[in-house]
Amino acid sequence: MHDQRQHIMPVYAPPPEVFVRGEGVNLFTEDGTPYLDFISGIAVTALGHGHPVLVKTLQEQAAKLWHTSNMFRVPAAEELSRKICEESFADRVFFTNSGTEAIECALKSARKYHWANSAPERTDIVTFTGAFHGRSLGAINAGGNPKYLEGFGQPLPGFKHVEYGDHDALDAAIDEKTAAVMVEPVQGEGGVRAIPEVCLTGLRKLCDERGALLIYDEVQCGMGRTGKLFAHDWAEAAEPDIMCLAKGIGAGFPFGACLTTEAVGSVMQPGSHGSTYGGNPLAMAVGNAVWDIMTDPAFLEHVRHISGTLTQGLKSLADTHSDKVLGVTGKGLLCGLMMKDAPKPLQVAARERQLLVGVAGNNVLRLAPPLIIEAKDVRQAIGVLDDALSAA
Ligand SMILES: *Cc1c(COP(=O)(O)O)cnc(C)c1O
């Protein structure tokens, strides 16, 4: 048989390993070799692989009902939206199949809000360099990464990009045409950079003064990843008007959510937006189960505790290998090693030692392990990275 890989659109270049099974923090190849998964399908399988509660939930729902579309009520979606609103700033939730679609809903909602409030000229979305918001035309224009825009025609109007950390440029960019400022409280793809908490508070204040909405993209950094349910929960008085969630919210079942205040959500009326699959019974069954596990205070306490252990381990690696490692970056279990050179060789060396990690930005080795890791998993990962750094 010819190589079937030639029929996959070549937008990814995966390594040769094929994983056929997962259990907890491990992935297994056909021959049973375990790999320690410290990237979680990029911050997705937050409860590890094959979590028994999630498996049972999905199996039971699969036997009952898969899909009706949003033409009909989906009680599990109503239940999850209520829970989300009880634990967040939000009053309204739109469920999607992915993070990118949550971003699209956020962008449309922000513009519609101003249109409905007699400011139709407010259409600009202000974002930051190093941002990543997904791969749709809207999302690549919001992200503004030239590499992702190349070849896809003129950049869309209505997006402004400000240098990350440049307060003066931000101040100048927000004007009477601004619909919203959109930001990841911890940048993922851009290099695992956590925005200082006081800056989020300042940004909230600035948006209020200028009549702009504030959108958080917590697709990667939300859902317990930093040790609080949402990354912005670490900051005082920094709640957004709109927030996007995905990745960890389904723990491997594909879905996302766009959360809004009542003022924003209520302008989205029948016909404003939609999704055939968004919030379908399979996704919502899993979503409720994930939510109940993650919102347990003891669960988040565990994440904060184990984050400290991992950060300590990374700091000691940075000390030992200061010839190659510049420092530790990120927040909670979305963290990494800032390297002097490209991080790819270290990622490969780790994989050769059965540890799966990611990369981000130009020079960051990215870690996003399942939130259920324990001290022994951290010891194993740090041991492998120590060995791989010594060999490299
Ligand atoms: C992954 C990601 C997205 C896009 O989510 P998809 O599910 O891949 O569409 C958007 N924003 C951030 C911050 C992400 O990490």
Image (cartoon, helix red, strand yellow):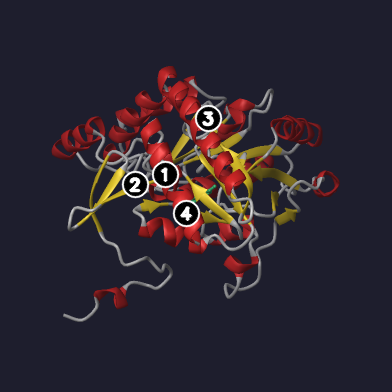
**Type of residue at label 2?**
Leu
Q: Quadrant of residue 18?
A: bottom left
Query: Which residue is label 2 attached to?
Result: 36
Can you tell which of label 4 and label 1 is closer to the viewer? 1
Left or right placement of residue 17 versus residue 209 in this view: left
The answer to whether the residue labelled 1 contacts the one labelled 2, judged by CB atoms less than 8 Å apart, is yes
Query: Which residue is label 3 attached to?
Result: 308
Q: Position of residue 251 (x, y in %)?
A: 36, 39
Q: CA distance from mark 4 to mark 1?
A: 13 Å
Q: Secondary structure at mark 4?
A: strand
Q: Secondary structure at mark 3?
A: helix
In this view, the residue in front, 135 or 65, is 135
Relative height, residue 338 to residue 284 (above, below): below
Residue 266 is at least partly visible in this image: no
**Type of residue at label 4?**
Gly
- Badge number at residue 358: 4
Query: Which residue is label 1 attached to?
Result: 381
Residue at image point 44% right, 18% down = 297
Residue at image point 31% right, 78% down = 6
Q: CA distance from mark 2 to mark 4?
A: 13 Å
Q: Residue furthest left?
A: 63
Q: Position of residue 196 (x, y in %)?
A: 70, 35
